[in-house]
Image (cartoon, helix red, strand yellow):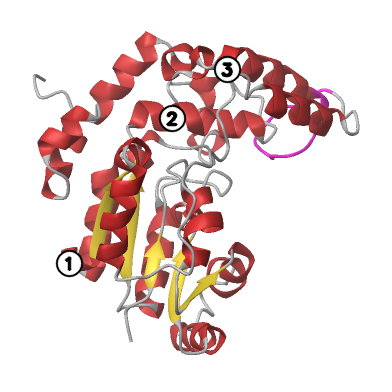
Amino acid sequence: MLSPIIHIGYPKTGTTWYQKHYYPQLQSCRYFSRNELIRLLIDVDVFTFNPQKVRKEFEQLAEGRRIVICEELLLGGLDIPFGNGEFIKVMADKLVSVFPDATIIVFIRNQAEMLASVYFQYIRSGGTYSIDYYLRLKNRFNPFYKTYLLPSLNNFKYKNIVDYYCTIYSSSKVQVYLFEEFRSHPAIFLEHFKENMQVQYVEYPQYSIVENLRFNKLYLTIMRFINHFSYLNTVRKNYWVNIPYLYYNILRFLTWSNKLSIFNSLRKTDYILGKKRINYIKTYYNENNKELSRYIPLKKLAEYGYVDESK
């Protein structure tokens, strides 16, 4: 039997599309939903976790088909506290104990683009923090635990996480892909990806669908303000008073109107982050990204803005 496929993220690299339109179209495969994965693997007491029992239940549900998992929550997603990487490591250790024979799929994205989309998703989910506070871009004189449950820039040092998976699995079992390649040349990319995964389609996936289109900067500002009037939909926020249904109604309108082409330029990372933050982010990750060359050619990393070879 072919090895299980475990696609761990990152979030904001097309995982929603893969979950809805790609993996469910694979022949002789059993794709596991988020709810199933949370029940079987994620929301389980680490002290009573039984890998053999969990593997047996996965196999029973798969009924002889190839096990397929695609879930960004395995890297913390954008909803589970990031801490300083503890959750990511615990989930990796769980995975290798249950699926030591798996093929691990990791999609990465240029960090400036990634963090702009991460912040959008936070605001879309009801957040109210400024971009600097949410992404811990500025030091504050607070106890460390006040920002401990927010994203850490270190968790987007892709090389560190990929290295760890290679340590517990072996480098031959870990495959790293660039989101930018998928987005730029989807047909070519998917053909290559299919061959690597050794899969066939029931029906060819439609890759023209865009999931979770990023808000433009104006809408981010409006939504951040509106979120102060709802205690939903994230715990990491401030709110002044709760007005029922306001959040959902405004979100619905902004999501619909955000698709208008007049907002295309305002969705760009330059507008959302600003040049100063982008320069800081690029410098912060440059050396770590260079070391990704053991997985992705350096020329390709430079082409998509991961590294500046002159630095």
Q: Which residues are magenta?
A: 229-240
| Residue located beneath label 2 in the image | 115
Q: CA distance from mark 1 to mark 3?
A: 43 Å
Q: Please identify the residue farthest to the right as the structure is shown.
A: 244
For residue 296, above or below residue 74: above
Image quadrant where one finds the C terminus: top left
**114 lies left or right of 35:** left
- Circle 3 sits on which residue? 261
Residue 172 is labelled as: 1
Report whether 83 appears left or right of 239.
Answer: left
Q: Secondary structure at mark 2?
A: helix
Quadrant for residue 182, please give it: top left
Look at the image and say whether residue 46 sits in the magenta stretch.
no
Identity, as a three-letter code, of the amino acid under mark 2 = Leu
Asked where in the image residue 304 lies, by quadrant, the reply is: top left
Query: Type of residue at label 3?
Result: Ser
Give the foreground label among 1 and 2.
1
| Residue at horizontal 34 percent and vertical 73 percent from the top | 96
Q: Amino acid at mark 1?
A: Ser
